[in-house]
Amino acid sequence: MFKGGILNMNFLIDGFLKAIALILSNDPYVMSITAVSIKISGTAVIISILFSIPTAILISTNKFRGKKFIISLINTAMSLPPVVVGLIVFLMLVPAGPLGILQLIFTPAAMIIAQFILVTPIITGISIASINSVGQSIRDTAFTLGGTKKDISLIILKEAKVGIIIAVLAGFGRAIAEVGAILIAGGNVAFWDAETDTYSSYTRTLTTAITLETSKGDISTSIALGIIVLSIALSVNLLSNRLQDRE
Amino acid sequence: MGMRLKIFLFLLIISTGCLSQNDEKTLNTISEPKEITLSTTTSVDDSGLLKILNQPFEEKYKIRIKVIAEGTGKALKTAELGGSDVVIVHSREKEDVFIKEGFGINKRDLMHNNFIIVGPESDPAGISGMKSGSDAFNKIANSKSRFFSRGDESGTHVKEKVLWKKIGMLNTGSWYKSIGKGMGDTLIAANAQNGYTLSDQSTYLKMKERINLGILVVGDPIFYNPYSVIAVNPARYPDKNEKYQMVMLYIGYLTSPEGQMIISEYGKDEFGHALFYPDAIS
Amino acid sequence: MAHIFKIRDLYKKYNEKQVLNDININIDVGEIFCILGPSGAGKTTLLRILNSIEKPDSGRVFFKKTNLLTSRGKEFLNSRRKMAMVFQDGAVFNSSVYDNVSYGLKIRGINKDEIRKRVNESLKIVGLEGYSGRRAHTLSGGEKQRMTFAMTVVLKPDVLLFDEPTASLDPINEKIIESIIRRINDLGITIIFTTHKQEEALSLATRIAVINKGVFEQIGPPEDIFYRPNSVFIARFVGVENIFKGIIRSNSIDLDWIRLKTPVITKKIGDKVTVCIRPEEIFLIRNDATHRNDYPNQFNGNITRMSPQGKALIRLFIKVNKRLIVKVDVPRHVVNHMDIEVGKEITASINHESLHVI
């Protein structure tokens, strides 16, 4: 590996080609990891949407004491260090911890909880900004045309729709790319599947698998996983950019 | 319309991913299939031994073994907090504390291998062939040759600290690099920067093809690296009684002639050399 | 005349500033009522209070028989839905012109066919036929403004409120909007609009209320405001360029550079007054004019400057003594005929009907 410049390139190219082969052959191990990644992050985002969007509407359309404080709290929470969140979830969910009775440690559910905590401030915060940017004049227009409170909320949602979708994509992008929280809370577990004679992921995601495979020196698998997670992150970003242009 | 369609497809893919894995493995938290959680060190997991070792047990008893691979310190801590039901670690001092404090019971010697000092071909400290680990460490320190430490309270790291303490070394200096990583990563780092490191035999053998470090010092009894398996004390977590039964089955299996035979054979095909030596006296 | 709005004792303060100060007016059904004043005078606030978007600090607002400030629930909603406002920087929804214009009808639960019919009618009134399918954001400034009109007209309300309807428009679009407003009024809808442009007030309104610093200084038909302003502020605001201080004598007003023979006025001898003379109401006298001496209130002066005043008039700046300049607006053809140029001496006459004394 460290034998000289030219060989360095060879090893990278070699690893890259093996990676493509893994992806194209639908390698079961890699596919199971991809499925778990999408499932965990997707579920976390979907559950977060159910909480974040109504909360965002409530916060931005109402006046109340401490509103500015809550909004800055949400914005600060957007940069919660994932490892810290993972640690907290771990300590909560171990049997010795307050929620230990749920027996959720080292399960996909624990990872979903950790990612939910990470993406909710993002989705909520960006949605609030979108709804706020809808502007008083839209609300005034809806009001003067005879809208009830419900009518006005609906039109605000409709006008902020694109911004909210961007918020969701940002949340998903964060979730799919993170590793610290789910590593600690999920344990990076894969089970041996006797039927298919390969490992199958239980709580192993693209990112946690990369840490593992890299530390084992398995470069081609790492590269394959890296290509997949980059592709997902890239498509999410491209979609988000296209939407922003339309705004 | 085109945009709405794209968004719909995107959400469809995600929800399909979510729903497709509908088998036991991913949806269980309430209706548990039989399962025990083993927390162990990265060196044990990375060696690939567990895959071969656990399979026959899982098939025979239909009990799934969930392996959480961490550093020794974390593995024991996880067990202490109830996150796992059984541990396999290699750090006598920490194991003693673990049992003394009542977290673990029914410890068994499982297997052992040896630590080795590995380093670059150029061997700047000139330790190749030495028989004493502490003398070799002395030479490395005196020549201020680059040394890579796992720095993660793992069994390997603890053994390394024992050696430094033995020669009264305070480990300061930019030649000593504590990187807080697993054995594989540490070997890769040492390899990249032509440095020395203390490694366990099995990880080194596994990684040999990918790195350019050679075994320089081997055989000192202080390098003896024993692994134990310890059950987590069910008295601390009463609703784990059922797990405890399964763990005892597992320990029984590991220390049985069958389990021990698998351990002694592992690695011979692939590396020409066993990675571990069985120790159990059943 | 029935009143559609009755406003009593209205007060509103923003951050220490008294934006509306004791406002009392009645607005009649079917009139085009203009609130004229400079920016920051309180015009927009008043309109927003009438539309129930904001609440005053105290006072009463009656819309037909309902007190808008105490009304609740369905009664309030029904009253609200009988009027609509077009804002100065009106926002449009991010969808088609049709969706924008039909919004108010959709939320009232009107059926689809009726909606389509009314939307088409309204687009016709504002001159946006065929624009239904266009995306609202692609419209030009003037088109967007007209669309916001259509959004309100389509509701067939009793009252429409326009806040500075031509503020951001070029003169051509200004004229278009003004004719649309007249068309809407012809349908029987009462119009209340605000503006700072005196020509607009003059050309559109049936009644004007001049507002300054939160107070209505004068309310009346356009001729009153323009030719008989109550105060120097109003005079200046409506374009009276010649405002002079004078003293009442036994039969005239002494302006120091001229003694004006005036009509009857209820002032005592010795009273200090202000005289307003509109620049277009002063006439030049040709040197060779017959019966020169018949012209009243003559004065001489030297033309120091000439500048165009709109398309048809030229403004002459005539120096009558060391300090004072009188401004006279003269049609172009007269300037040419009389060979008028800077530096020339000129004689002019002021009709005593053209005088207004404050």
Image (spheres, coloured by chain):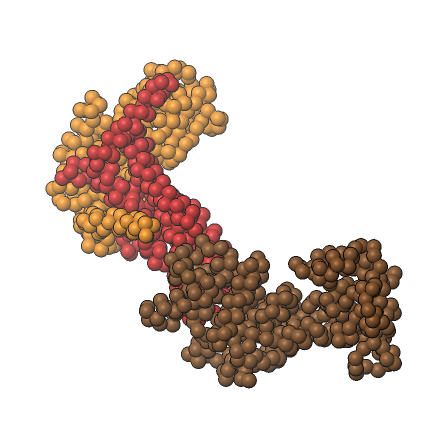
Residue drawn at (11%, 42%) of the image = B60
Q: Left or right? Give the position of C346 relative to C311.
A: right
Lateral position of residue C265 relative to residue C27, left or right? right
Where is residue C3 drawn, in percent x and y?
54, 82
Q: Nearer the viewer, residue A202 or B220?
A: A202
* Residue C130 drawn at (x, y percent): 40, 59
Q: Position of residue B196 (x, y in %)?
A: 38, 22
Q: Residue furthest left?
A: B60
Hue of chain C? brown
Image vertical order of residue C21 relative to residue A141, above or below? below
Q: Is residue A183 left or right of residue C51?
A: left
Residue located 37% across and 23% down the image: B191
Across and down, in percent, residue B167 comes to 42, 25
Task: Kindly indicate which chain is depicted in red in the rendered structure.
Answer: A
Q: Nearer the viewer, residue A49 or C230?
A: C230
Residue C239 in view of the camera: yes
**In terms of image quadrants, where is residue C120?**
bottom left
Locate the C terminus of chain C by quadrant. bottom right
Q: Which quadrant does the N terminus of chain C fall into?
A: bottom right
The quadrant where residue C242 appears: bottom right
Question: Is residue B155 visible in this depiction of the protein?
Answer: no
Q: Residue shown at 21%/40% (left/top)?
A: A200
The residue under the point 46% across, 18% down is B143
In the rendered picture, chain B carries what hue?
orange
How many marks the image carries: the answer is 0
* Residue B174 vertical position relative to residue C311 in the rendered view, above or below: above
Nearest the camera: A136 or B250?
A: A136
